[in-house]
Image: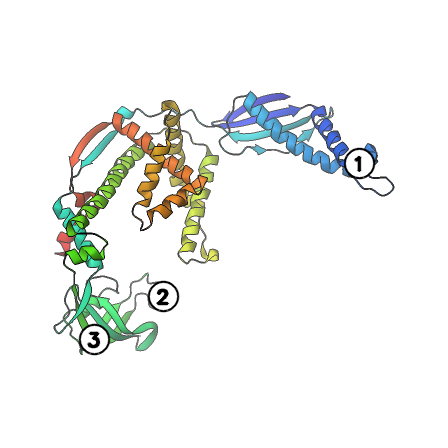
């Protein structure tokens, strides 16, 4: 077998392979001989059909099959001989049969670039220093109380946070419109779930009143016949309710499956610590990955980028369909995902190089710990654990996460690191305190 390699430019390679004639003819004859043992052709006894007859009837079909198989096996052999590792599936041009009977084919493909790992010492990583205070636990408990609040009817006017139950009917240009009417509809003042101006028009109203509201639909409203139109709503307020949050008592703790208020606070703190550790890792990872991407300097195999972009398109398509979009309405342009695909390919090459150079591995205990961490927030964590361990592919994804975390930490340990004191609230909900100040 003769093999030659050309480099047209960049990462592209052209591999030309010439296979001796007997490598094809021998296999064709062997296959025809095997078929002859069971062949049934009129005029011949089973197993007694002459090879010449078999070749005449089945020779072309068998030869085509054998040529395809020889190309595949010869390609693998030639790649190994030349110590080439294609980045993606090689594209094989139509094979040629020479006058001497030799089979020649050419495969075009890209190779992986030579990956140089960026100097970890050139990276800058800011590590938040966070302590969970009792006030943070109180804030989380308030969120739990909010989720379990009850509504108590009141006599006074509706205020921020109150719930108004009403009937309404909307008109545009004097005509009622589809979807503009409802009965016993509940609106929470300040929730911003209605069109702008609707909730404001209900502030200060009491049960039995019939305020008239004027609301303008946004220009990009999905219903084109209503976009940018001003609607008049006739309403009747039926009742106004104020929220009543449960106190944090032993009874409240018991309703959440806890033995005491202190046990509840301990459980809340434990969950917060788990979320905090996860967010800290994400914060460091984001910084490391962004700097690696900005400074990678790699020539990327276009085939891998295209393949990754296709994967992203398919993931988005499945997500949109799971949210109710019809298959025929999901038309995604792959170019939308090109930058994200290039980023994934570049980072994947760098991370793989570090894993190889540093002999990093994800051992069983680390994978188990990661699976348990993923499962912890669920009501039935053991079912989630069984879900991952019941499928080798899903478990392999977790192993990849563990390895990725090790590579990120490898960079972070060698990077220029600074500590930044930060509150739990600022880390978990950036901008939340500023937003609260603006709304005060």
In the image shown, does 141 or 76 lie closer to the viewer? 141
Which residue: 16% across, 48% down? 137
The circle drawn on residue 237 is: 3
First reached walking from the N terminus: tag 3 or tag 1: 1
**Disc 1: CA contacts within 10 A as few (<14), some (14-19) or many (>=20):** some
SS class of the residue under badge 1? helix
First reached walking from the N terminus: tag 2 or tag 3: 2
SS class of the residue under badge 3? strand
Q: Where does residue 41 sit, x and y in percent of width and height?
A: 82, 42
Q: Are marks 2 and 1 in contact (CB under 8 Å)?
A: no
| Residue with the mark numbered 2 | 223
In the image shown, does 42 or 52 lie closer to the viewer? 42
SS class of the residue under badge 2? loop
Between the C-alphas of marks 2 and 1, the distance is: 70 Å
Closer to the camera: disc 3 or disc 1? 1
| Residue with the mark numbered 1 | 54
Placement of 358 over or under 180, stated as above or below: above
In the rendered view, does 222 fall on the left or right side of 104? left
In the image shown, does 3 or 374 lie closer to the viewer? 374
Q: Are marks 2 and 3 in contact (CB under 8 Å)?
A: no
Q: Where does residue 402 sit, x and y in percent of width and height?
A: 35, 34
Between the C-alphas of marks 3 and 1, the distance is: 90 Å
In the image shown, does 104 or 427 lie closer to the viewer? 427
In the rendered view, does 375 fall on the left or right side of 312? left
Is residue 233 visible to us here?
Answer: no
Placement of 113 over or under 170, stated as above or below: above
Q: Quadrant of residue 339?
A: top left
The circle drawn on residue 425 is: none
Q: Where does residue 275 sit, x and y in percent of width and height?
A: 24, 43
Q: Residue furthest right?
A: 43
């Amino acid at each position: 077998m003769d093999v030659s390699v050309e480099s047209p430019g960049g990462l592209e390679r052209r591999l030309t392979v010439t296979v001796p004639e007997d490598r094809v003819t021998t296999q064709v004859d062997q296959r025809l001989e095997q078929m002859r043992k069971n062949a049934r052709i009129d005029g011949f006894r089973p197993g007694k059909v002459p090879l010449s007859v078999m070749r005449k009837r089945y020779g072309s079909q068998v030869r085509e099959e054998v040529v395809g198989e020889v190309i595949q096996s010869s390609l693998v052999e030639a790649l190994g001989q030349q110590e080439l590792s294609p980045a993606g599936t090689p594209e094989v041009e139509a094979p040629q049969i020479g006058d001497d009977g030799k089979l020649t084919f050419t495969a075009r493909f890209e190779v992986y670039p030579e990956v140089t790992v960026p100097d970890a010492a050139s990276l800058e990583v800011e590590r938040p220093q966070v302590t969970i205070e009792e006030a943070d636990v109180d804030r989380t408990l308030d969120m739990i109380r909010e989720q379990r609040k009850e509504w108590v009817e009141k006599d006074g006017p509706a205020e921020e946070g109150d719930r108004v139950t009403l009937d309404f009917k909307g008109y545009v240009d004097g005509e009622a419109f589809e979807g503009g009417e409802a009965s016993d509809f509940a609106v929470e003042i300040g929730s911003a779930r209605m069109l702008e101006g609707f909730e404001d028009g209900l502030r200060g109203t009491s049960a039995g009143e019939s305020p008239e509201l004027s609301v303008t639909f946004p220009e990009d409203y999905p219903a084109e016949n209503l976009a940018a139109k001003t609607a008049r709503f006739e309403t009747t307020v039926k009742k106004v309710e104020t929220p009543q949050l449960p106190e944090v008592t032993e009874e409240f703790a018991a309703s959440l499956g806890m033995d005491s208020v202190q046990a509840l606070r301990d459980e809340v703190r434990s969950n917060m610590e788990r979320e905090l550790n996860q967010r800290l890792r994400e914060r460091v990872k984001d910084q490391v990955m962004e700097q690696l991407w900005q400074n990678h300097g790699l020539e990327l195999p276009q085939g891998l980028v295209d393949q990754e972009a296709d994967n992203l398109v398919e993931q988005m398509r499945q997500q949109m369909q799971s949210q109710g979009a019809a298959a025929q309405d999901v038309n995604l342009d792959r170019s939308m995902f090109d930058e994200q695909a290039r980023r994934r390919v570049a980072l994947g090459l760098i991370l793989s190089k570090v894993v190889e150079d540093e002999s990093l591995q994800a051992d069983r205990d680390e994978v188990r710990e990661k699976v348990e961490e993923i499962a912890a927030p669920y009501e039935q964590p053991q079912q989630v654990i069984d879900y991952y361990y019941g499928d080798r592919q899903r478990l392999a994804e977790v192993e990849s996460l563990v390895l990725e975390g090790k590579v990120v930490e490898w960079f972070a340990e060698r990077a220029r690191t600074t500590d930044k004191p930060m509150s739990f609230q600022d880390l978990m909900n950036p901008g939340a305190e500023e937003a609260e100040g603006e709304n005060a």
